[in-house]
Image: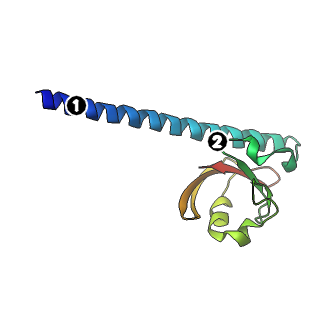
Amino acid sequence: MEEIMKRLTQVLSFLAVLFVVAGAWAADKAAIIHNVDAIVAGIDSGKGAMDFKAEAYEPYIFIMEDGGMLLVHPTLAGSNLKEKAPPAYAAVVQATPEGTWVKYEWKGKEKNTYAKRTKSNLIVGSGY
């Protein structure tokens, strides 16, 4: 009986950790959506892309022209994503005015990005 209780405690502890991690992940996704939506609303209201700084958000944001030119990015601003990383560009360009989650591989790791288009067809994104 003691062994069963010990195992049950271990399983319950594992499940508790799993639920905490899942909750934090959901909160991060909500924060990402909030940040991207707020930036899109700002641009749609007249702010310029350069009014936003990539590192001011956690995780960072990027703003890209439809053709791939990154206007705002912590390390790739001024680069063309379509030329530099075609698979990432192919995923991110699927952005919609309503916002959508896309997946792609970046430097050997799977990335999940929430991407949304502005009225002027810029793409704003952020992810993990």
SS assignment at label 2: helix
Q: Is residue 93 above or below residue 48?
A: below
Residue visible at 27% across and 35% down in the picture? 11
Residue matched to label 1: 8
Q: Secondary structure at mark 1?
A: helix
Task: Reply above or below: 31 against 98.
Answer: above
Q: Nearer the viewer, residue 74 or 69?
A: 74
Mark 2 vs mark 1: in front: 1
Looking at the rendered structure, the kind of residue marked 1 is: Leu
The image quadrant where one finds the N terminus is top left
The residue that appears at 18% across and 27% down in the rendered structure is 5
Taking the spot 65% from the left edge, 66% from the top edge, the residue there is: 90
**Residue 9, image quadrant:** top left
Label 1 Cα crowd, 10 Å radius (few <14 / some 14-19 / many 20+) = few
Q: Which residue is mark 2?
A: 32
Task: Report if the CB atoms under discs 2 and 1 are less than 8 Å apart.
Answer: no
Residue 97, disc: none
In this rendering, position of residue 55 left or right of residue 5 = right
In the depicted structure, whether residue 7 falls above or below residue 124: above
Label located before the other in sequence (2 or 1): 1
Where is residue 72 shown, x and y percent of the image?
79, 53
Residue type (three-letter) at the residue carrying disc 2: Ile
User: Nearest the camera: 121 or 83?
Assistant: 83
Which quarter of the picture shows residue 123?
bottom right
Name the image quarter holding residue 66: bottom right
The Cα atoms of the two marked residues, 2 and 1, are separated by 36 Å
Q: Position of residue 44 (x, y in %)?
A: 83, 44
- Kindly give the residue lying farthest to the left in the view shown: 1
Q: Callout 2: few (<14), some (14-19), or many (20+) C-alpha neighbours within 10 Å?
A: many
Look at 37% across and 31% down and name the residue there.
16
